[in-house]
Image: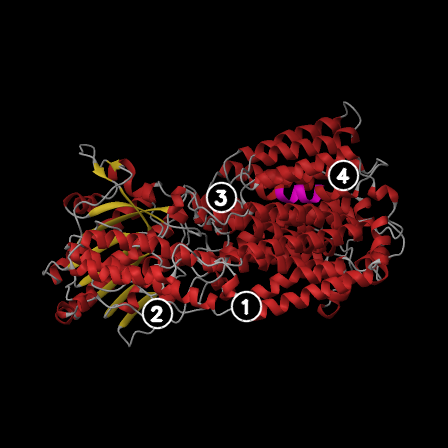
Amino acid sequence: MWIAYALVVHVLLLGSIFVIYFRSPVITGLTPQKRPLSYGLEAPANRLVLIVTDGFRADSFFEENCRYVPHLRDIFVREGVVGVSRTRVPTETRPGHITLIAGLYEDPSAVLRGWKKNPIDFDTLFNRSSQTYAWGAEDVISVFSHLSNGGKMHFRSYDHELDFSPGYDAYEQDEWVFKRVRFLLQRKSEALQQAKNVVFFLHLLGLDTAGHVHKPGAPKFRQTVDKTEKGVYNIYQEFERVFPDKRTAYLMTADHGMTDSGAHGAGSPHETDTPFVLWGAGVARSAPNPGGKTFMPDNEGPAMPLHELEQAQLTPLMSALVGLPPPMNNFGTLPVGYMNVSKEYEAVAAHLNALQLLEQYAVLQEQHKKGFFADFLSDFDVLPSSAVKNYEEGILKLHKNREYSHSLAKSQVIMSQALEGIDYYHGYYRRALLMSTTSTFLGWIFYLYRLLSRNRAGTVELILERSTKWVRLSLASYMVLLVICLLSQRTPLDICFYLLLPNFVWLKALQPWNLNFSSSPSSAYSVPALQTTMGQLVLIIGCAELMVFTFFERRLISVGFFAFACYNGWGSFQPKSRDFFSWLALVLILACFPLLPLSVGYQNGYLLLAGVITILINSLWSTRARLSYKNHTKYCNALILLLTIVCAYLHSIGRKTPIPLKLASWMFLVYAFASIVLSKEPRLEQRLAQIGFNLGSLYATLCTSYEAVFVQLLAIELGISLRAQNAQAERSVLRLAFTLLLYTFFSLFGSGNIASISSFDPNIARCYLSHFAPFVIMGLVLLKLLVPVVLIMSVVYAQSEFVRQHEEQIFICLLLICDVMGLNFLFLVRNQGSWLDIGTSISHFVIMEVTTLVILLLFYTAKQLLRVIPPEEIQVKKLLLRLVHWDAISAKHH
């Protein structure tokens, strides 16, 4: 039953982080602010043209003194301001566009709807406008198209599943947009010339596609840059021709950047730094530049100031230029000095921005004060209600006295305080939730410790048996009191649940033996299975802590792997034997792989060929294994490896993968697993050889460089090490549990990075796809990450009799180690500082919790592939029962 508990508890612990840090930032029940026109002030621009070049990083824009954007350089040298806007993680397309157009950082609860729909509708620049015209990719346009604005929002989009083969010209996506913009301007020019507060939005996906396929800095990527920036310049000239009144403002920027490997999603400067060029009506020629940074627009100079803004600040700036109030859910603050307008207009725009932020703050403050204990709980003292009232009255006086500079300064201060207050009330229960989650962790770890020891005569068990009634009464009383307090305070239900969760976990953890472990064997585990010396324990804890830091520095896992492999295997071999030197050479070679550059986005045909040769040698070297293969296994694997090399070659010369080769790849993917499951081979060693051959070949189809070599060498080293250890009498469940965890993480970090799940390279799908299908590619990325883990689990289970005999104890130890690491990450989570630091630390905790569940699932998969579990027993209706009686089923087969 403990496995079912483990699944439930870890899913709930994973959910706790979403409650603590990922609460929706969207505040409802707000009222839009007035337009500057209601204050008798005319906007400097009648229309705004927002051009978003998807995935265009700042480095590519400013590279070699703006050599690759000559037409845009002509614009910002002549007028406007240019600089860098900084995004927040995740640096993906959807969050970046929401930040630009709504001033709102992505609603994390949208993950529950697959990032396709907004759980709570939010206000945008489009909603505030009188008319909006937008063109672009379907997945971007659909985010905003359902937000009604009385039929005044017009959207056109194209299907996102476009060709990403090397010969495809990504600029065709941008040309699609430019053609339709020209058509609209020709068809409705007269009507649009009279309109005001109009927004035109052009989403240009070409550079993002080119970056993924060719990588930034590649000749074909620069060709796309050349075409796109020239296209932007031409469409600018078209707008100027149709609207000669000089009342059009332009902003060209990007939603996110991109790494050298063509990935994005994380928080490196290449991903967060995006260029912006702001010019046209109402835009100042110079703006404050506190950092004093400059850049050279060409080889001759002079140097120009490089302005820096947060991405969300562009939203109120665009709103002010076109005479609109900021969107109601906006979190951006108007940057001072970027508009060529009167002091009065800028002061009023900043005041409207401040009122919009203060309204969000007031709603949260009011919700807090509705609670029964509100008078006894702390408030945000920096910005009490009286201060807000004084600000509103003071601004009226300042405007009446024409003290606009003073008004602007006060608005800037109050906006900063309002944002602090919003963050304060959003995270009001954060500290309590962190303490509650820590208590849940400790309760679960204590439960696992009791489950592992199973010593009924122990001191802890005797104390618990004597004090059962007192423990139950104490926990029940505390729970009733807490429920009354939470309901009286009108605490949200999800927060209530996680504040109460530790009580249920500790109630289970503190139950007497006869209630807690009634389904478990009455005897303790065998003494050899639990032999762990103090030196081993210290080494394992040290390596576990070192593994925590590998999430921050990938290369550290080399040290942990080398130290543990030497300690674990050095004494298992005959001194100076061939096996010993072979094993030691493999350990040294494998320890070097994490020191190499990431394989994500890196392509090398020679290393891929070396991986294919390694797979063939490893699979066919043994005469016994070679003779055990069926003919279809030999021929199918050999053909798919040849197909992999052909596809890699075609991709390198810019040719499409023929459809028959893609069909063959998909057929082999099915064959690789089906042939293993349907095989009637009863011997574990021969089944393991087939698993290694099939999965190794399948993995090669998803590789771009040295990954296949690494995984094959890792499997060989693990097999040699386990066979040597089988001859030893001394065994340790804790050591084997750590071996499973170490090799799992080493397979992930050794050739790449877990971040590749979100920052993926579409080129791994070159044998399967030529069009850009994000979810299919994501599935192939996950397959690429999981196949090595399944292979490792299969090697461990097939090569170690001790593992097959003590799998339950090993997994309890594995959960203990994972939960200790998870507790580390819980305290390493940052709730202050940049969103980059917060997001990265949270993602580490999420990865750790998911890994615990995935290892359990993949170990079960490996057992099925090895036919340890008969396939006729695998029925959905019996799956939960099999998990509950894991030991009984295992015992039956041993």
**Looking at the image, is mark 1 or mark 3 earlier in the sequence?**
1
Residue 711 lies left or right of residue 514; in this view the side is: left
User: Mark 1 or mark 4, which is nearer to you?
Assistant: 1
x, y (%) of residue 778?
A: 51, 55
Q: CA distance from mark 3 to mark 2?
A: 34 Å
The quadrant of the picture occupied by the N terminus is: bottom right
Amino acid identity at mark 4: Leu
Can you tell which mark lies on residue 145?
A: 2
Amino acid identity at mark 3: Val
Q: Is residue 107 magenta?
A: no
Residue 20 lies left or right of residue 278; in this view the side is: right
Q: CA distance from mark 2 to mark 4?
A: 58 Å
* Residue beneath disc 3: 600
Pick the residue in front: 677 or 413: 413
**Looking at the image, is mark 2 or mark 4 earlier in the sequence?**
2
- In the image, the segment drawn in magenta is 739-745
x, y (%) of residue 148?
A: 33, 74
* Residue beneath disc 1: 489
Element marked by disc 2: helix
Extreme residue in the top direction: 576
Q: Is residue 743 magenta?
A: yes
| Quadrant position of residue 183 | bottom left
- The answer to whether any part of residue 321 appears in the image is no
Q: CA distance from mark 1 to mark 4?
A: 58 Å
Element marked by disc 4: helix
Can you tell which mark lies on residue 722?
A: 4
